[in-house]
């Protein structure tokens, strides 16, 4: 099955579960043409389909993983103490899968980001090593969250750099027109429960963000409260694309909340799943970090090691460290880089096919 047919079948499957916004899907299709890195981010469904064929050693202990993990699936938030925390910030496709799938996808995305010059001053081989070193260190330590208030100086500097101009963040949100269509009662109910007061007057906008989730309903409530701007977002959830292909364990549950709750992390008190909607606070210090927003001279090795460690933080929520460590030792050197390179090549071929046919 080629990428065009796979996309048609997946989107038909998805449309049978939730309403889709056709204009946003077309935007996603166009962005998939831009570069292999964008294509990878947008097509976890294709990854789920071809990964067992491309990577020979796919048998591994299963964990509750991210699924569509990549190097721009990390961001910051404030914990209940108001401390700045860094980590994985999107669990739309969370599902039970071999732990190696998350690792290979993270490394493959790093390789493509290097090619696109979003990550600089590092080679693909060194990126593979950095992520695996970080993952192993996290497993050995038994997990530890990334609280940036007093530790992780280099990571804190990278994360804080983009917070210097909050006006741009709010200008972009406030520039969105108010929704003309009716908004799902489930989304409104979730948003209202997450506002600081039931008296807050807000307007609803249709928000377009991300890549993998483009096409799903996504709303933001914007308001002025006590002298400043506030925002809450509601995004519709459904089953992971891992279930779509159907060759592995059929998981009919939405695992977003469970993945957050079981991981070794300082949770964001402003992210909750309400029915079939994930509701979160939006703010300059509470959002995904795009690689292009990092300082020019960022420490790529340190950043990728941290991503590997944070992946371990998630996996340790559902699998004992000794089991993961034992399986890692069996794999020997070079396996992760080799598997990632194979998936990068398969992704490039699909991207080329997509560009020809779309």
Image (spheres, grey):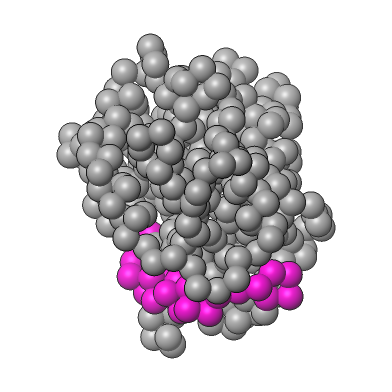
Q: Is 181 above or below relative to 115?
A: below
Label count reads 0
Q: Is 17 above or below relative to 229?
A: below
The residue lying toward the viewer, choosing from 342 and 176, is 176
Question: Residue 89, how many percent across, how many down?
Answer: 51, 41
Question: Residue 165, how many percent across, how many down?
Answer: 22, 39
In the rendered image, the quadrant that contains the C terminus is bottom left
The residue lying toward the viewer, choosing from 322 and 282, is 282
The residue lying toward the viewer, choosing from 103 and 27, is 27
Residue found at the far left of this picture: 296
Q: Is residue 33 magenta?
A: yes
Question: Residue 305, how many percent across, how many down?
Answer: 41, 29
Magenta region: which residues?
A: 15-37
In the rendered image, the quadrant that contains the N terminus is bottom right
Residue found at the far front of this picture: 199
Q: Quadrant location of residue 216?
A: bottom right
Q: Is residue 75 magenta?
A: no
Q: Quadrant location of residue 238?
A: bottom right
Residue ID at (54%, 70%): 215
Residue ID at (68%, 45%): 273
Q: Is residue 254 left or right of residue 215?
A: right
């Amino acid at each position: 099955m080629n990428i065009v047919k796979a996309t048609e079948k997946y989107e038909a499957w998805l449309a049978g579960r939730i309403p889709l916004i056709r204009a946003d899907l077309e935007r996603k299709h166009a962005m998939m043409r831009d570069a292999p890195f964008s294509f990878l981010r947008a097509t976890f469904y294709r990854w789920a389909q071809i990964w067992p064929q491309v990577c020979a050693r796919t048998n591994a202990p299963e964990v509750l993983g991210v699924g569509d993990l990549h190097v721009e699936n990390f961001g910051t938030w404030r914990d209940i103490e108001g401390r700045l925390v860094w980590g994985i910030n999107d669990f739309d496709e969370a599902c039970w899968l071999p732990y190696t799938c998350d690792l290979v996808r993270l490394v493959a995305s790093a390789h493509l980001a290097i090619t696109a010059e979003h990550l600089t001053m590092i080679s693909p081989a060194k990126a593979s090593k950095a992520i695996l070193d970080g993952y192993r260190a996290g497993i050995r330590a038994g997990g530890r969250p990334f609280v940036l208030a007093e530790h992780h100086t280099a990571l804190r500097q990278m994360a804080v750099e983009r917070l210097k101009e909050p006006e741009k963040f709010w200008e972009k949100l406030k520039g969105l027109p108010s929704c003309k269509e009716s908004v799902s009662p489930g989304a409104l109910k979730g948003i209202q429960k997450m506002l600081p007061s039931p008296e807050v007057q807000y307007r609803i906008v249709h928000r377009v963000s991300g890549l993998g989730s483009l096409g799903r309903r996504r709303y933001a409530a914007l308001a002025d409260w006590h002298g400043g701007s506030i925002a809450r977002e509601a995004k519709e959830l459904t089953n992971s694309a891992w279930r779509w292909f159907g060759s592995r364990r059929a998981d009919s549950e939405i695992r977003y909340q469970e993945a957050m709750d079981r991981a070794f992390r300082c949770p964001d008190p402003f992210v909750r799943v309400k029915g079939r909607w994930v509701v979160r606070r939006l703010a300059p210090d509470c959002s995904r970090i795009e690689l292009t927003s990092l300082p020019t001279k960022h420490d790529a090795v340190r950043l990728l090691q941290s991503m590997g460690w944070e992946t371990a933080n998630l996996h340790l929520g559902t699998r004992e460290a000794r089991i993961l460590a034992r399986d890692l030792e069996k794999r020997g050197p070079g396996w992760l880089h080799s598997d990632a390179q194979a998936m990068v090549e398969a992704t490039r071929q699909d991207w080329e096919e997509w560009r020809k046919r779309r």
